[in-house]
């Protein structure tokens, strides 16, 4: 049984499999390689995923959600219609859809996967991703970091040795990995990143600027107006290069807005500066001069921005390379990793060594300045090579203490509160004067980037394993069973006819966003197409589909997806 | 075991050979299969590489530079932070624009501050070095333009810092980000450091009050990454100065704003419900005195009498009247009803409700009391069962003595002690904490 490689992205997801000769990307039911990570619920409560859902984002924005990857590893939930979903559940719906596509393509059940996550994803987010896969009926064989996956695809493609800097600017996250490829070894030297920086933020910055110019706030506009604005800005971002004149509807006003490259540059400079910080940090951590980097590789759809390329180009004094499709290269890398796990034929013996991108540690009492709060005691330093296991001794902080609470944090701040809380575990210790009792805390970080913590009480010899409690965003066994039950009860749109539904959803969107004659024409087109569908003659349907799509294309100029 | 032994090599300066040996060994020591051996191998590999590099450097620069000090600094990854900028390319990672006289904080800064601030948008401050450079190559021109722009922005910043009364709002600093020069690495670093120098100076004058509020500092930090480069900056300005300037950043908490911004669609997002144990616990907790405990008990019994005993008693009397067996013993019958019904009902209520989310019976709840274990947390059900049994046994068997003894126990009563649980006066604890603040 094949292991599939899945890129579960903020904006788009993709899935691939190792075939022996190379990676085969699996098309979804609509024939696309990319499946938008959008989930919608229709009026009858059926779930839809992908392009059909994406078309409904404007006019059914209360029943559709995108970019939920941002909420992974948190306890936030999103309401769609009258149902409430966690980000983990939403991701599992996307994974389920990909899994079905893979099964249809391969003609066999798919139960195992390698899933890529941003290198800078924290422990909570990784756990949430793993659980999303479990909810979708997939066992995660490995969580692979996205830049590493991209590097694998490149390494195999180019057969080149040297030091590479991978920049992965996706829809919602930015990752930097510095890695070296030699003699079949792929060694990651350092990873850094920003979990809240991606293409979506560029669009947000554009929207914010437009709204500020017209003294409007996001809350004052209805959701559908915002979605429409978002769509227009997204389109404008794709067509940068020459001046575009947009007519924007802002509530009851209509304004003309000129999108020029200069305007765009001014608006997104703060974001580009944020791009530079992790790059500099990765180089600092690896003690490397930018001259030593042999090649800068761009991954992720947002690296298509000319401004991003020129900024990076200036930093390194050379043009970055981008030979493979930045949208699918991560899925290809994940599929290669899947092939490696199966020891698939046609793959040279490549060994991958990775690092943990964050410092992991615990809170200790701050005696110099208790007002500031506890200090952070690093246990595993960032960019240590994984798997790694480190022990540290901690002792009691007050007399007659009977319980020690080990708080588990991840981050770089010296104040423990400012780091990411991963969980805690409490152990009982015998009474005694302060400092007499001690425990040995062992942090183990595995190849998937998942952390395990054991605590041993020195005097009693009692050991506590893996008792991390209160992990944000994580499901307990009960929750998971409940969630599984709930998700299993959800009805999916049937696979057949998905293309027709996607076309109708697009027609509907066009109908609602146009006026007058144009609107009537769309209605007419849709009516005729529905009539053909009713006749259920496959040949006619195929012909009508093509006609309908062409008509919509000509109306819209291009498919905005 | 030395690194060379692990790698199976003679000591060598040939990094290529080291890598080859490492790669060969790695194939049989995969990180996912042999984590321990892999760590040892990897450590040996890194050590060997750094030894080889030292060797190469010593060979390059002659024996006198290959001192022990260098050897010790090398293996630490973060040593790069203190590495001097390489002489061949001064613009990287040098943090200062070379021609700028104002960035060196020791000498020029105070002089500048003594002068009246020039008009904010004046592009021509006294700039003598500029004239000398005018006839040079275009590259020089660009450098010149950069330092001019640097100057101009700094003056604008200084004007914002110097403004009397209302401090400048975060939005007024936005002009920095829209400047096209900011994307130039050297310019960006130079400006960030120069601005930091001003802030350090300012905080020194103001006796420790941070010169910027959290919002502004947060914004500027997102531009200049001061937090991320704290080590570098502290080396230059001193730890204490950085602490003073960046204090508001430490105090502010990052909200969920960034998290929710990128999300598209959805009817609403539901933030994590506040969990019961997330409520802040007062620093000092008080036991509940005997009087309040008795009052709570009386309230509970009255509630039970009204809701449970009374209706049953009334019905039974009506039935008795109907059958014609009723007599004059109505009050006594109420008391017996009470004993038979209310006492077991109270115990049952205590058993269920004290282990429930409120941790109190209705009477205790009205008075703001909570039953907890010795960690001040909710009792598990079985623990509470033991508490109820202890209550019955202790009070029923030795009732008079117990009441007398309890009067002297300051709210930590006998059955509490036996069952290792507390009844905390939560309302009072919270009140006192508030008053203390």
Image: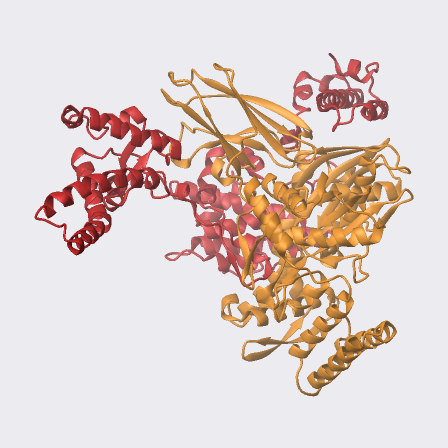
Chain colours: A orange, B red
Report the residue at 53% width, 71% height from top: A222
Q: Say whether residue B341 is left or right of residue A225.
A: left
Residue at far bottom of view: A517
Give how far across and how far down residue A488 sits, in percent. Answer: 64, 52
Report the residue at 16% width, 25% height from top: B408
Q: Say whether residue B420 is left or right of residue A340.
A: left
**Can residue B286 be spotted in the picture?**
yes
Q: Say whether residue B252 is left or right of residue B93.
A: left
Is A277 placed above or below B138 here?
above
Tell me the quarter of the picture where residue A448 sits. Answer: top right
Is B312 placed above or below A339 here?
below
Question: Could you tell me which quadrant the C terminus of chain A lies in?
Answer: bottom right
Give how far across and how far down residue B329 sits, in percent. Answer: 9, 45
Question: Could you tell me which quadrant the N terminus of chain A lies in?
Answer: top right
Q: Say whether residue B327 is left or right of residue A243.
A: left
Report the residue at 76% width, 53% height from top: A100
**Can residue B118 be spotted in the picture?**
no
**Which residue occupies the foreground of this view, A90 or B41?**
A90
Tell me the quarter of the picture where residue A387 sits. Answer: top right
**Which residue occupies the foreground of this view, A29 or B333?**
B333
Give how far across and how far down residue B222 sits, in percent. Answer: 56, 49
Is B12 placed above or below A206 here?
above
Is B157 placed above or below B396 here?
below
Give how far across and how far down residue B234 sits, in percent. Answer: 53, 35
Residue at far left of view: B328
């Amino acid at each position: 049984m094949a292991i599939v490689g899945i890129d579960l992205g903020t904006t788009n997801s993709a899935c691939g499999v190792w075939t022996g000769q190379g990676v085969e990307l699996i098309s979804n039911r609509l024939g696309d390689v990319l499946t938008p990570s959008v989930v919608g619920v229709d009026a009858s409560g059926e779930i839809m995923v992908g392009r059909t859902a994406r078309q409904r984002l404007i006019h059914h924005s209360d029943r559709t959600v995108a970019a939920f990857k941002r909420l992974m590893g948190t306890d936030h939930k999103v309401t769609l219609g009258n149902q409430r979903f966690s980000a983990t559940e939403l991701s599992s719906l996307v994974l389920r859809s990909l899994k079905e596509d893979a099964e249809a393509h391969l003609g066999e059940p798919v139960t195992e996967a390698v899933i890529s996550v941003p290198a800078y994803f924290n422990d909570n987010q990784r756990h949430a991703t793993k659980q999303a896969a479990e909810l979708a009926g997939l066992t995660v064989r490995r969580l692979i970091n996205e830049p590493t996956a991209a590097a694998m695809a490149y390494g195999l493609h180019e057969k080149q040795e040297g030091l590479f800097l991978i920049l992965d600017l996706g829809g919602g996250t930015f990752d930097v990995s510095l890695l070296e490829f030699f003699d079949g070894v792929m060694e990651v030297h350092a990873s850094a990143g920003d979990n809240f920086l991606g293409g979506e933020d560029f669009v947000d910055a554009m929207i914010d600027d437009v709204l500020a110019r017209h003294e409007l706030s996001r809350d004052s506009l209805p959701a559908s107006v915002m979605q429409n604005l978002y769509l227009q800005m997204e389109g404008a971002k794709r067509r940068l290069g020459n001046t575009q004149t947009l007519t924007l509807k802002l509530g009851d006003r209509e304004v003309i807005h000129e999108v020029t490259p200069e305007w765009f540059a001014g608006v997104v400079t703060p974001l580009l500066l944020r791009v530079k910080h992790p790059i500099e940090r990765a180089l600092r951590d690896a003690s490397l001069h930018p001259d030593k980097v042999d090649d800068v590789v761009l991954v992720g759809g947002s690296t298509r921005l000319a401004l991003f390329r020129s900024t990076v180009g200036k930093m390194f004094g050379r043009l970055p390379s981008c030979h493979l499709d930045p949208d699918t290269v991560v899925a290809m890398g994940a599929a290669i990793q899947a092939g490696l796990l199966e020891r698939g034929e046609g793959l040279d013996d490549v060994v991958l060594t990775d690092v943990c991108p964050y410092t992991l540690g615990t809170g200790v009492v701050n005696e110099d300045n208790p007002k500031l709060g506890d200090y952070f005691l690093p246990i595993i330093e960032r960019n240590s090579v994984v798997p790694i296991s480190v022990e540290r001794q901690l002792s009691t902080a007050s007399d007659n203490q009977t319980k020690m609470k080990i708080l588990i944090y991840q981050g770089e701040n010296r104040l423990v509160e400012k780091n990411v809380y991963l969980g805690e575990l409490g152990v009982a210790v015998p009474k005694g004067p302060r400092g007499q009792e001690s425990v040995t805390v062992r942090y183990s970080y595995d190849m998937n980037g998942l952390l395990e913590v054991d605590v041993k009480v020195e005097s009693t010899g009692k050991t506590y394993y893996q008792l991390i409690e209160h992990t944000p965003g994580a499901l307990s066994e009960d929750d998971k069973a409940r969630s599984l039950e709930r998700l299993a009860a959800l009805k999916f749109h049937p696979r057949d006819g998905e293309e027709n539904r996607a076309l109708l959803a697009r027609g509907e969107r066009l109908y609602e966003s146009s006026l007058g004659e144009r609107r009537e024409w769309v209605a007419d087109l849709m009516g005729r197409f529905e009539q053909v569908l009713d006749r259920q003659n496959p040949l006619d349907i195929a012909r009508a589909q093509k006609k309908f799509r062409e008509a919509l294309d000509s109306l819209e100029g291009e498919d905005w997806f | 075991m030395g690194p060379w032994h692990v790698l199976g090599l003679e000591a060598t300066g040939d990094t290529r050979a080291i890598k080859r040996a490492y790669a060969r060994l790695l194939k049989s020591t995969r990180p996912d299969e042999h984590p321990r051996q892999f760590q040892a191998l990897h450590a040996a590999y890194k050590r060997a590489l750094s030894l080889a590099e030292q060797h190469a450097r010593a060979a390059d620069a002659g024996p006198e530079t290959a001192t022990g000090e260098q050897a010790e600094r090398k293996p630490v990854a973060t040593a790069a932070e203190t590495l001097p900028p390489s002489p061949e390319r001064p613009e990287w990672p040098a943090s200062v624009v070379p021609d700028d006289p104002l960035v060196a904080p020791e000498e020029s800064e105070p002089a500048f501050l003594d002068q009246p601030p020039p008009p904010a948008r004046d592009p021509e401050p006294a700039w003598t070095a500029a004239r000398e450079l005018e006839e040079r190559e275009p590259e020089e021109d660009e450098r010149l333009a950069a330092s001019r722009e640097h100057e101009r922005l700094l003056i604008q910043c200084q004007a914002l810092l110097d403004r009397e009364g209302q401090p400048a709002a975060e939005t007024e600093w936005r002009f920095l980000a829209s400047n096209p020069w900011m994307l130039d690495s050297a310019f960006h670093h130079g400006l960030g450091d120069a601005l930091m120098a001003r802030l350090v100076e300012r905080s020194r004058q103001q006796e420790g009050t941070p010169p910027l509020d959290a919002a502004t500092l947060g914004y500027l930090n997102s531009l200049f990454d001061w937090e991320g480069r704290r080590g570098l900056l502290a080396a230059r300005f001193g730890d204490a100065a950085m602490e003073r300037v960046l204090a508001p950043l430490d105090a502010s908490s990052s909200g969920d704003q960034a998290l929710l911004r990128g999300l598209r669609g959805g009817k609403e997002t539901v933030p994590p419900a506040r969990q019961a144990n997330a409520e802040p616990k007062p620093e000092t907790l008080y036991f509940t005195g005997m009087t309040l405990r008795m009052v709570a008990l009386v309230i509970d019994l009255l509630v039970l009498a009204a809701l449970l005993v009374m209706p049953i008693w009334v019905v039974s009397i009506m039935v008795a009247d109907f059958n014609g067996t009723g007599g004059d013993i109505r009050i006594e019958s109420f008391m017996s009803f009470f004993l038979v019904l209310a006492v077991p009902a109270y115990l049952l209520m205590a058993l269920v409700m004290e282990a429930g989310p409120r941790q109190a019976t209705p009477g205790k709840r009205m008075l703001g009391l909570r039953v907890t274990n010795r960690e001040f947390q909710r009792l598990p059900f079985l623990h509470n069962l033991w508490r109820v049994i202890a209550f019955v046994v202790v009070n029923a068997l030795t009732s008079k003595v117990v009441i007398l003894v309890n009067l002297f126990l300051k709210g930590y009563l006998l059955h509490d002690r036996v069952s290792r649980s507390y009844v905390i006066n939560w309302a009072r604890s919270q009140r006192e904490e508030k008053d203390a603040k």
